[in-house]
Image (cartoon, grey):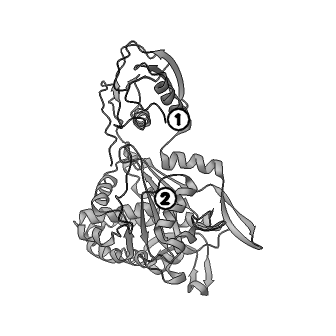
Amino acid sequence: MDSTNTKVALGSRAQRRHAPSPEGKNRIIQVVGIAVLVVVLFGIGILAGTYSFLGAIYDPPVSGGQGVVIAPGERITVLFLGIDRGVNDGGPRSGVARSDTLILVSFDPDTMETGVLHLPRDTRVAIPGRSGFDKLGHAHAYGGPLLAMETVSQFLDVPVHYYVRADFTGFVEAVNILGGVEIEVDRDMVYEDPYQDLSINIRAGQQTLDGEQALHFVRYREYPNADIGRIQAQQTFIRAFIEKFYRLNMLWRIPSLVGSVANHLSTDIDPNTMLRLANKAIRMDDLDKVTFAVLPGAARDVVEAGRTLNYWVADPIETSNLADRLVRGIDREANAQVRIRIQDGASSPARVAVVAEHLRTLGYMVIEDGNAQRQDYEQTHIFGHDPDEKTLLRLTRALGHLNDHGNVKLMEPDDEEDGFAFTIIVGSDIHASL
């Protein structure tokens, strides 16, 4: 599931790899996001050899279906859910609690590119099976993680393959095992919410927050920009958490940390898949490949059924563009700089039209250029004119979606580039229709 099965037969120019910069290797402490923390915990599972730990947090799908099917070259998406136990005592395997934090992570197992998209819990969405609009954080309370996944998938028009769900208790205990986390608090945080049994009183300044204080820090939301301010505070805290995790060389505390977290996590990622993903994640040598973003939009009051409700209302165009880049792995702006010539190599104008239309929808600049010198190509060929590796991989994947094998043959051209980055000769392996 983590390979494009692409056959590569390029010359030395196209095989060049760029070594990661020293700065990239040293930026682990700059990575933010709850998703990265969970990846660290997965790595702990590997280092400790705790396959049984992974099995303990595995929550098999109730449907008993054939499992997740991921197409060759497709990015893997995971929805991370932080459960709001303070409202109705929903535990890590409970389907009744609201999700206080929602983060969609998209991971490319070949390029190691990772997109981390924070979704405000007050985002205005349509929840499948319910009338009208609601807040995204309520989806979990109505139908557990599966409904939350379906809601996010429908809202962003992207596949959501897995979920990871955690409650507040595991967060508190993980912070305490580190001996607290040092952080600069930029304001006095005073907040009371009897409904959630929540009383926050943290003073501004440099402090070492214990587990309970840290939980209050990341839950505080009396910011001018409301939930967006809370998300930014969460990112600040996770950055500090990871910095201390590595500064303390936490390997010797692995048994304590694993034991504390196991009862407060659940996921539908099976242990074998989890190990494969974690093995790739902990070997990531260039963390500049991790991109973080917040769902674009604005806080607005919306009148519905005679009530005024405050939502985070997403900007549809910016959201679609962001989902392309962070979740689907499609960079239309970069693709627009790539000139491609397409030639018919199988006496099939229909196949040429399919390839051209598909690539144009992805933003490529495509020129159809008649017939190839031969008409007996059974396999589609790409001739790359000194391409960079990332562009080549993305184009190969795009074509791989148009045949049954998920692969094409890559060749180095004999002629000059003639203004084109690639020449594609369409073979009979391409489907005649999209």
Q: Is residue 434 left or right of residue 170?
A: right
Give the percent coordinates (x, y) of residue 393: 39, 36
Q: Say which residue appears at 44% left-offset and 75% top-offset.
A: 167
Q: Position of residue 125 (x, y in %)?
A: 62, 62
- The amino acid at mark 2 is Leu
Mark closest to the chain's N terminus, 1 or 2: 2
Residue 375 figure quarter = top left
What amino acid is labelled 1 in the image?
Ala
- Residues packed near mark 1 inside 10 Å, few (<14), some (14 to 19) or many (20 plus): few
Q: CA distance from mark 1 to mark 2?
A: 23 Å
Give SS at disc 2.
strand
Write down the residue under mark 2. Answer: 104
* Number of residue marks: 2
Position of residue 220 in the picture relative to residue 408 (left or right):
right
In this rendering, does residue 418 appear at all?
A: no
Q: Element type at marker 1?
A: helix
Front residue of 406 and 2: 406
Residue 334 tag number: 1
320 in relation to 339, above or below: below
